[in-house]
Amino acid sequence: MPAAPNEPVLLRRDDGAVAILTLNRPQAMNALSGELIDALQAEFDRLATDHAIRCVVIEANGERAFSTGHDLREVASSDSYAFHHDLLTRCSEMMLSINRLPQPVIAKVHALATAAGCQLVAACDLAVAASTARFATSGITNGLFCGTPSVAVGRNVGKKRALDMLFTGQPIDAEAALRDGLVSRVVPTEKLGEETMALARTIASQPPQQIATGKVMFHRQMEMDLPHAYSYATNYMAGALQSEDAKAGIDAFVNKKPTPEWKGR
């Protein structure tokens, strides 16, 4: 189903140094249509070079769902392998763009996130969930194993928990998602907006160059074995200590000075 007449499928507003992207297909439970995938990709491409933005929040309109994954009406509109491969490739590239952004990305999850919608949550650097939110990789109940969602979800929650979700399609609640590592915080539903923006503003107040390079470093070392990870992180930190921000921050701590004004990225 399309967005409401004359409304874009993705909205953006900026709150200081925080960009807020809103999935805007509430009638379709914010299913990730090709149009919405492309709109997210275009916005991520813009954000990648937007030095005024230091943190990104992804939220969704509508009470029922954050996102229920791929738009199955669109998927069913063609039997073509090429059509399906192109759609999935664009979605995977969009998810990878979250990892590649210099800014941390926070999913603000107020309700149901399933299949590729759960993948979107897992692809974000952080996720704040309302206590009433639920998560599932539910493709199997429609006859389809959630292959691409398994990539991000498996890297968040580990093999056995991911396969439990993937084989059964059964939803987990917010507390289980927090326990398993799919989300980073669970808050009362009525405080979701307040708590998410407080986290985003805290991140946005940190030195942006350190955040951007630290995000790259973290994701890379997570894919390495332990000795290589320590070697890579050691080289990173030795270099980071030479930066103006690190020198100014350490000097402020040692000499009890006010927090310095951080350099831009």
Image (cartoon, rainbow, N blue to C red):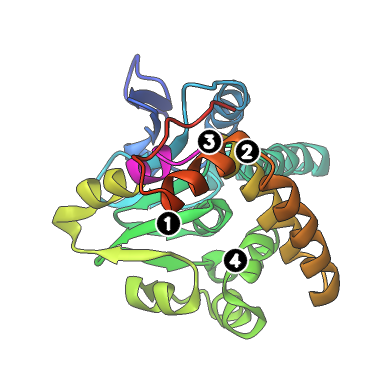
Quadrant where the C terminus lies?
Answer: top right
Look at the numbered disc 4 and give the secondary structure of its residue.
helix
Mark 1 or mark 3: whose residue is earlier in sequence: 1
Mark toward the viewer: 3 or 4: 3
Secondary element under disc 2, as helix, strand or loop, is loop
Please tell me whether the stretch drawn in magenta is mainly helix, strand or loop: helix
Q: Is residue 61 above or below residue 235?
A: above
Q: Disc 1 vs disc 2: which is toward the camera? A: 1
Q: In the image, what residue occupies the spot 49% across and 52% down?
A: 117
Please give left or right for residue 5 compared with residue 76 in the image.
Answer: left
Query: Compared to 48, does 72 lie above or below?
Result: below
Which amino acid, by three-letter code, is at mark 3?
Pro
Q: Which mark is residue 127?
A: 1
Give the CA distance from mark 1 to mark 4.
Answer: 13 Å
Chain part drawn in magenta? 200-208
In this rendered view, identify the residue nearer to me: 254 or 261. 254
- Tell me, for residue 208, which label it has, or none: 3
